[in-house]
C-alpha cells in the first residue's frame, strides 16, 4: 500500500494524485509525526495494493469535513477512514477486502479494540454505496468530530450492508480516550437526527436506541 501526506489547503491541486485502483484510506491529522508513524506501519501491513492519504488539518476543519473533502476529490472503488492514533494489525486491509466480498456488504468496521464490532469507528466502504447515502459526502456534513461514524454505521446496519471482521485490526491507541468528552454539538445533533431516523434512513427502533 502506498502513502501520501498532504495539506488540507492543497486538496484541489492534489486531486490528480488521489486515485487508487484499490482501497483509498483517509487519515485526517493534526500531528504529522504521529500520522506518519501510523501510516508507515499500516501500509507495510496491508498486504494489498491501495493508497493511504494523511491530510494535515492545519486550519482545524475537523475530521468529518476533511474526510468528506477527500472523498469528493478522490477516485477508488473502496474508501475508508482512520485516525492518526490507529495501530494496524497484520493483513488488516487484505482481510477487510475479503470480508467485503460477502453479498450485500458495503461498510466494514475494523476491530478498533473498543466497540466490539458494533460500529465502524474506523471503517472501509464501497464508494458506490457511500455515494448513495448523503448524495456525495461520506459522512453527514453537520458533524465535526464525533457521531458521523455512528450514523453511517446505523444506516448500513438498517440496510443489512454492515460487516465486521474481528481479525482485521485497526486499534485505536488513545491513552486518554476514556476520560475525554465528545463534542457537545455533535452529540446534540446526533440525538436530534436519531429522533427523525436520520432523514428516514433508519427505522429499526433497536438500532435507533443503540447509541442514544
Image (spheres, rainbow, N blue to C red):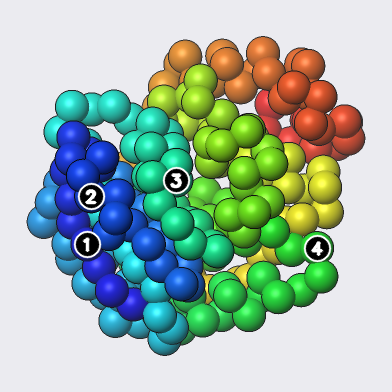
User: Quick one: quadrant of the C terminus?
Assistant: top right
Task: Read off the residue under disc 1.
Answer: 4
Task: Read off the residue under disc 4.
Answer: 104
Q: Earlier in the sequence, mark 1 or mark 4?
A: 1
Residue 118 visible in the snapshot: no
Give the x, y percent position of residue 114. 52, 54
The residue at 62%/47% (across/down) is: 130
Quick one: SS at disc 3?
helix
Q: Earlier in the sequence, mark 3 or mark 2?
A: 2
Task: Report the mark closest to the observer, 3 or 2.
Answer: 2
Q: Are marks 1 and 4 in contact (CB under 8 Å)?
A: no
Quick one: SS at disc 1?
strand
Mark 1, residues whose alpha carbon is within 10 Å: few (<14), some, or many (≥20)?
Answer: some
Q: Is residue 80 left or right of residue 104?
A: left
What separation in Å lies between label 4 and label 2 (alpha carbons)?
A: 33 Å
Q: Residue furthest right?
A: 204
Task: Read off the residue under disc 3.
Answer: 71
Q: Earlier in the sequence, mark 4 or mark 2?
A: 2
User: Quick one: quadrant of the N terminus?
Assistant: bottom left
Give the x, y percent position of residue 43. 31, 75
Q: Earlier in the sequence, mark 1 or mark 3?
A: 1
Amino acid at each position: 500500500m502506498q502513502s501520501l501526506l498532504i495539506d488540507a489547503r492543497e486538496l484541489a491541486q492534489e486531486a490528480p494524485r488521489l486515485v487508487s485502483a484499490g482501497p483509498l484510506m483517509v487519515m485526517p491529522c493534526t500531528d504529522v509525526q504521529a500520522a506518519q508513524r501510523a501510516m508507515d506501519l499500516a501500509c507495510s501491513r496491508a498486504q494489498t495494493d491501495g493508497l493511504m492519504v494523511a491530510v494535515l488539518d492545519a486550519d482545524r476543519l475537523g475530521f468529518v469535513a476533511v474526510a468528506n473533502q477527500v472523498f469528493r476529490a478522490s477516485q477508488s472503488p473502496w474508501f475508508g477512514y482512520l485516525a492518526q492514533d490507529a495501530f494496524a494489525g497484520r493483513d488488516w486491509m487484505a482481510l477487510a477486502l475479503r470480508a467485503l466480498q460477502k453479498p450485500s456488504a458495503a461498510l466494514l468496521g475494523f476491530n478498533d479494540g473498543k466497540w466490539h464490532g458494533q460500529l465502524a469507528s474506523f471503517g472501509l466502504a464501497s464508494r458506490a454505496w457511500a455515494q448513495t447515502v448523503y448524495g456525495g459526502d461520506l459522512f453527514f456534513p453537520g458533524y465535526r468530530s464525533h457521531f458521523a461514524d455512528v450514523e453511517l454505521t446505523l444506516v448500513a446496519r438498517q440496510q443489512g450492508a454492515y460487516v465486521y471482521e474481528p481479525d482485521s485490526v485497526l486499534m485505536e491507541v488513545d491513552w486518554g480516550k476514556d476520560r475525554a468528552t465528545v463534542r457537545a454539538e455533535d452529540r446534540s445533533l446526533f440525538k436530534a437526527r436519531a429522533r427523525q431516523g436520520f432523514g428516514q434512513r433508519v427505522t429499526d427502533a433497536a438500532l435507533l436506541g443503540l447509541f442514544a
